Amino acid sequence: MLIAIISLGGLGLLFGGILAFASQKFAVEVDPRVEMVQEALLGANCGACGYAGCSKFAEEVVAGNAPLGGCTPGGAKTAARIAEILGQVAPETEARLVAQLVCLGDCSVAKDKFIYHGVPDCKAAMMYSGGSKACRFGCLGLGTCARVCPFDAITMSEKGLPIIDADKCTGCAKCRNSCPKQVIDMINARTFHYVRCKSTDKGKQVREVCERGCIGCGICVKNCPQKAIRLENNLAIIDSFICNNCGKCVEVCPRDTIV
């Protein structure tokens, strides 16, 4: 018994010594700035930076592989803090982007092809003939975008459309990336006018399925004093970086598609 105890004790000491040696021999030095950068981030792990979480982004930005302003949700304040930690010059502030739903096809104005009783998820609904909406471009209203938003910036209206709180939105784009209908755009937060439609169908087809859809009449294009609106594939598009919010397009739109 005594021999067994001594043997086990000896083996324990031997392997403990080997592990201690290995831990020192193969130790990976961690730059203390990585932890400092990680603490400066919001900790949402939203992936807007293009990396798998805040810790990975912190490692890459310290290594010089990621831009100082790569944390979109953190904005200019976080970029300035990271620059301070790394002893670099803070990047110039870019326009803040926010998510915007570009569809007005709620249950009161848009027609359905059928009644959907499946899994309450937009991607799942898309598997059934592209979804229940008669407009093939319309929001399905099942709240996938609201569920993936890490900042609680999206709620669902009683009529089945997402409501985006621009003050809470950080521009991480998770909602846009999760939308199978691609009816969420990232726009300049300073712009208050936008075309709430994605349909590129011709006017007659749009009228048949939705009361608010863009029919590509071009009236807004002709009346925009800033030349901020163009017509592409039967759809009016407002450049949010040119628009000065004069509101002329809202006044002349015959379908109230610009709000």
Image (cartoon, grey):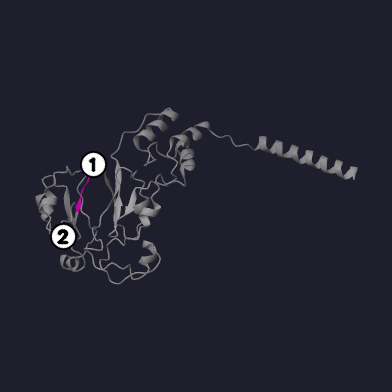
107, above or below 76, in the image: below
Q: Are marks 1 and 2 in contact (CB under 8 Å)?
A: no
Q: How many marks?
A: 2
Which residue is the extreme one toward the front?
158
Query: Residue tagged by mark 1?
Result: 190
Q: CA distance from mark 1 to mark 2?
A: 25 Å
Residue 107 is situated, as x and y percent measured from the top left of the image, at 25, 63
Residue 160 is situated, as x and y percent measured from the top left of the image, at 29, 60
Write the residue at 35% across / 52% down. Answer: 175
| Residue 238 in magenta stretch | yes
Q: Amino acid at mark 2?
A: Gly
Q: Which residues are magenta?
A: 237-241
Quadrant in which the N terminus is drawn: top right
Query: Residue tagged by mark 2?
Result: 216
Residue 132 is situated, as x and y percent measured from the top left of the image, at 31, 68
> Could you classify mark 2 by the number of other residues whose Cα lies within 10 Å: few (under 14), some (14-19), or many (20 or more)?
many
Nearer to us: label 1 or label 2: 1
Q: Which quadrant holds residue 211? A: bottom left
100, above or below 133, in the image: above
> Could you classify mark 1 by the number of other residues whose Cα lies within 10 Å: few (under 14), some (14-19), or many (20 or more)?
some
